[in-house]
Each structure stands twice: as structure tokens, then as C-alpha cells.
Image (cartoon, helix red, strand yellow):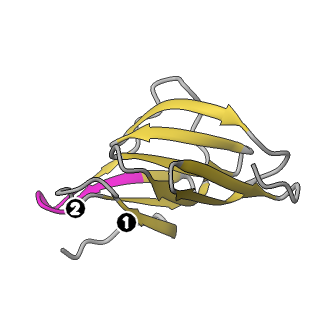
Amino acid sequence: MKDKSGPDLIFDLAFTKKDGCYDLWSAGRKHFAHWDIQKGKKQKGIYNRVSGQTSHSCVTSCPSGGAYSGGSNSKVHIWEERTLKQVVDCHKGFCGAIKWVEGSLYSGGKDGIIN
């Protein structure tokens, strides 16, 4: 699959860790998107009044099929496909790194703290 992201700058990509699924997420300036590889579709993230739109510098996925992104608003965003389900305050300043490892989520931010 090859598709343009439009005017959206992409800072990070994460493929799903869910068995038998080939989705991925992209994170970037003022955007978060879910890409369904099998259908060849890109869909922008839906914020649903959970949080205002922000830039996302990083993204990771977990085995259940969800994704987590680090925002310039200092929060970790929890996604189900393209829908934002929850935000968690984690840092002071932007969240610049995020990783799912063996059942745990780790994030790092401008504040120099790893959560």
C-alpha cells in the first residue's frame, strides 16, 4: 500500500501487535491517523471531546489492537483504532517517546522523566 498523508507531517509510525491484523497508526503535527492496510484506507483520529486536537510526536501499539501516542500537550493518548478513548497526564512539556514492552507502557518527556 502506498498513500500520501496529505499535508500532515508524520513523526512516527507503529504497526499493530495484534495477531492476524495489519493496521498501523501514524502520528504527526496536528494529526493522528489509523491506516487499515487490507482495505487500503487512512482515517484521521476522532477526538470525541475527550481532548482537543494536538500534535503527536510518537506512537506505539499493544497486543489487544489499541495504540498509545505521546502528545505535545504532555499527555499520553489511548486509542482504539482511530477513536480516542482516554488521555492521561504524564509529563510536564511534550511527551516525546512511548513504547509498549512486555505488558507495560513506558513514556518519556521533555521533563526528563520516564513513566
Where is the N terminus found, in terms of image quarters? bottom left
Q: Residue furthest bottom?
A: 2
**Is residue 9 in sight in this rendering?**
no
Q: Position of residue 2 (x, y in %)?
A: 22, 76
Q: Position of residue 63 (x, y in %)?
A: 36, 50
Name the one closer to the observer, 59 or 19: 19
Q: Position of residue 53 (x, y in %)?
A: 57, 40
Taking the image as shown, residue 97 lies to the left or right of residue 6, namely right
Front-lying residue, 54 or 103: 103
| Residue 38 x/y as whole percent | 12, 61
Q: Residue most toward the left?
A: 39
Q: Residue at x 51, y 68 (%)?
A: 12
Mark closest to the chain's N terminus, 2 or 1 = 1
Q: Is residue 107 magenta?
A: no
Foreground pick, 113 / 45 = 113
Q: Which residue is mark 2?
A: 22
Q: Determine whether, in the image, residue 94 is placed left or right of residue 32.
A: right
Q: CA distance from mark 2 to mark 1?
A: 21 Å
Q: Which residue is mark 1?
A: 6
Classify mark 1: residues with Cα within 10 Å, few (<14), some (14-19) or many (20+): few
Q: Amino acid at mark 1?
A: Gly
Which residues are the magenta region? 33-41
In the image, taking residue 20 as reference, residue 89 lies left or right, namely right
Above or below, 46 relative to 65: above
Badge 2 element: loop
Q: Looking at the image, is 81 positioned above or below residue 49?
A: below
Mark 2 Cα-neighbour bin, 10 Å: few <14, some 14–19, many ≥20: some
Q: Quadrant of residue 25?
A: bottom left
Q: What residue is shown at x 88% (from left), y 54% (from top)? A: 111
Disc 2 residue type (three-letter): Tyr
Please indicate, yes or no, whether residue 44 appears anywhere in the rendered image.
yes
